[in-house]
Amino acid sequence: MTSGHKNLHKYGFNTNNKVYIIAEIGLNHGGDIEVAKKMIDSAVRAGVDAVKFQTYITEKRVEKDSPVFDIIKKCELPFEAFKELQEYSKNTGVDFFSTPFDEESVDYLESIDTGMYKVASFDAVNQKLLKKVADTGKPVVLSVGMADINEISQAYEILLKGTDKITLLHCVSAYPTKEEDANLAAIYMLKDSFDCLIGQSDHTSDIKVPLYAVAAGAQVIEKHYKIDEAMDCVDAPVSITEEQMKYFVKQVRNLENIMGKGTLGISKAEVGTVPYRRKI
């Protein structure tokens, strides 16, 4: 967020802001497209830049004997639902994209001309899926939870063969993440190591950590989302409400102003103090 912050447009983000805020609806619709639409409406009211979903075939995502198979199956939306949700998002004025978990999902999202892809931390080491996504040539956002610097570098190089519009999100894959485990210093490491956009995918249960992430230079923030506390949804422990998101967006925009442009010299605010400078 200094004068060296990157232009979000160059990385495929449709915003004039310095920070792009994503409401991760993910699985919280519970497999009900009407609930998904209500969540989009809610996210728009909160002022986010984008809503994100997850596109997958359950049998290709987890084994049938997995303890989460039934939950993920229940939350699975048919492919055609994503075209409807994409159009619905466009009509409400918010960006739409999704996380594909298999090659068929990438093919479908390509068929509806999705503008951007998200790759989950679980697939940061899935070279086959990374190559499939890279081959689309579209902007890619990759969460790097659990990945070490060598694994991130390998993923980055694969993506770079298809697109230079790459965003890496620092992420701690613990649900929920305790504040003391947030490891926000990793944002500095990523910024020093990769010539791309850096952000954070947050799994804490509040908004303090992602606000600190913005202050540390994160320009894309992904936060799991629910309409309110009464909402019964899969990712409730790591999701924030419309009220919380609205306050978060307001604080981020305020922080953008506070951080300024990072220029040095006599600022407009300092003009009246100039006569008191002492040169000896």
Image (cartoon, helix red, strand yellow):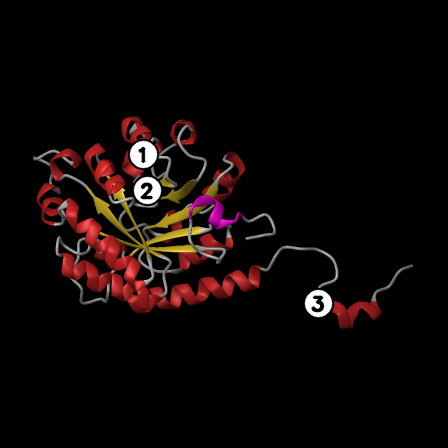
Task: Using the image, determine if residue 174 lies above or below residue 260.
Answer: above
Question: Which residue range is magenta in the image?
Answer: 6-12
At 36% from the left edge and 33% from the top edge, which residue is drawn?
147
Q: Position of residue 257 (x, y in %)?
A: 55, 64
- Counting other residues with Cα less than 10 Å from the Cα at mark 1, is it few (<14), some (14-19), or many (20 or more)? many
Residue 215 in view, yes or no: yes
- Magenta segment: does it hold 9? yes
Mark 1–mark 2 Cα distance, whole angstroms, equals 7 Å
Q: Residue 183 location in percent, x, y?
A: 42, 45
Disc 3 marks a residue whose amino acid type is Lys
Question: Disc 3 or disc 1, which is closer to the eye?
Answer: 1
Q: Which mark is residue 133?
A: 1
Q: Nearer the viewer, residue 65 or 103?
A: 103
- Residue found farthest to the bottom: 272
Q: Are marks 1 and 2 in contact (CB under 8 Å)?
A: yes
Q: Quadrant of the C terminus?
A: bottom right
Label 3 belongs to which residue? 268
Q: Secondary structure at mark 2?
A: strand
Q: Is residue 1 above or below residue 163?
A: below
* Type of amino acid under label 1: Val
The tag earlier along the polypeptide, 1 or 2, is 2
Percent of width and height locating residue 243: 31, 69
Residue marked by disc 2: 117
> Would residue 104 be found to the left or right of residue 119 on screen?
left
Q: Please, what is the three-letter code of the amino acid marked with disc 2?
A: Tyr
